[in-house]
Amino acid sequence: MPRVVVIGAGQAGASVVAKLRAEGFEGAITLIGDEPVPPYQRPPLSKKYLLGDMALERLYLRPERFYPEADIDLRLGSAVTGIDRAAKEVVIGQERLGYDDLVLATGSLPRRLPASIGGDLGGVHVVRTLGDVDAMAPGFVPGARVLIVGGGYIGLEAAAVAASCGMQVVLVEMGERILQRVAAKETSDYFRALHARHGVDIREGIGLERLMGEGQVSGARLSDGSALSLDMVIVGVGITPDTALAEAAGLEIDNGIAVDAMGRTSDPSIWAIGDCASFPYKGGRLRLESVPNAIDMGDCVAGNIMGKEVAYVPRPWFWSDQYDVKLQIAGLNTGYDRIVTRAAEGEDAVSFWYFKGAQLLAVDAMNDPRAYMVGKRLIDAGKTADPDLVGDASVDLKALLK
Ligand code: FAD
């Protein structure tokens, strides 16, 4: 009986095992995760769960009984320490487990601040796991002073929760503007203004010089020479794909574990999916850090393990919740040369459309699900829209689909 072993019981790992069973795979499946809890969704960690608005069980991707019922051997709190490719075995401490197909779904690791600038002090947090959030949540009390390092989506979402809890929030972004790496100036301006209205002190073009404190963080010095008194620091300065096992096993790495169009690594018996994997895309390579990518790659590789030989085609989308604003993003904006703003009815509702020449690349829609839906349909179909019509709010969105 063939055996599939999956390393990493996160979003992508849960997707591939469920799809294998849904497609009728009858062999043995083992899903190994080093966290102590069943596969769960991470997005609420910096949103509803951190705010205390979501129970733990609702984070789980599937009820715990799903795994035994689907005959999936789920091993939690269990770290794979090595891969023996010649023997086709994974190493878990003293144990060895054979595989016919191995799937790497190891996700990514948050970048941390170096100890040399106080990154190892108590009260300095990252936001990646349930454990991370459970550790910081008790500090979310009115009046507490928090410094957020990094103005990406994770930092901004944490800032929104902290401000909603009545905390005093300073956010520093070393780059010229928040969201610089991922969004247009228009989107940065929108979120800067939104946070300012909620009392968040956003300082752009300013870095953290060092954190101060004896054991516990109590202050910070910023690159402009200013000083802050603090109770807590949240670091949101990006992630790196977790490629350690793959590298040690001699697999090809290229901004993540390099896979072919089917999701296969440089070893034909080993696949990689989700945050840790980079796949061929438009003549180069792409690695996405998102739930839809983790789910879809998992689905695709499950089919390919069963012999379907279907290439993975990403249909990128993403979302972020901050205060009462829901941002939905369709497409990838890389290479855009023009932004078209479309006004919308409703509080804080607007959308920004990214074009490269005449081609629509992406849409950032704030509190405007229709703009998102229409943009996504156009982008997924490889179509475009007339920028003049997009920018004219009196033109019905549906007309863009014609
Ligand atoms: P993960 O879900 O990280 O799972 C990998 C698992 O593998 C982890 O549990 C890890 O501990 C385990 N592992 C690693 N090495 C080993 C080993 N050697 N042995 C055993 N287990 C191992 N995406 C969106 O699309 N929208 C959002 O709004 C959004 N918000 C987010 C908010 C937060 C706070 C975070 C952290 C992420 C967010 N994301 C969001 C990103 C999304 O959650 C990830 O892209 C997704 O979880 C990737 O799935 P994955 O399975 O590749 O990795």
Image (cartoon, rainbow, N blue to C red):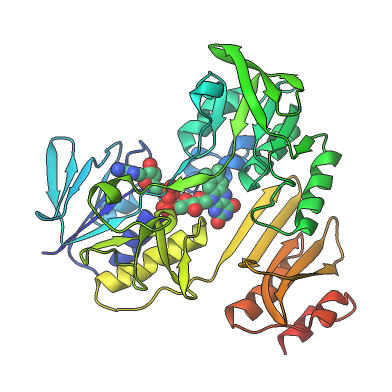
Residue lying at 64% horizontally and 47% vertically, measured from the top left: 153
Residue under the point 38% across and 67% down: 299
86 or 373, which is in the foreground? 86
Q: Is residue 367 above or below residue 375?
A: above
Location of residue 396 by image quarter: bottom right
Q: Is residue 244 above or below residue 52?
A: below
Count of labels shown?
A: 0
Residue 321 visible, this angle? yes
Residue 333 on image: x %, y %: 65, 66
Left of 4 or right of it: where is 258?
A: right
Q: Residue at x 69, y 44 (%)?
A: 175
Q: In the image, 286: left or right of 335?
A: left
At horizontal 83% and vertical 68% (from top left) the residue drawn is 341
Q: Quadrant of the C terminus?
A: bottom right
Residue at the outermost right position: 394
* In this view, 221 is above or below 243: above
Counting from the top left corner in percent of width and height, residue 74 is at 27, 47
Quadrant for residue 211, please give it.
Answer: top right
- Nearer the observer, 223 or 168: 223
Q: Position of residue 29 (x, y in %)?
A: 22, 57
| Residue farthest toward the front in the current orientation of the protein | 224
Q: Is residue 107 left or right of residue 377?
A: left
The x, y position of residue 176, in whole percent, is 74, 46
The N terminus - image quarter: bottom left
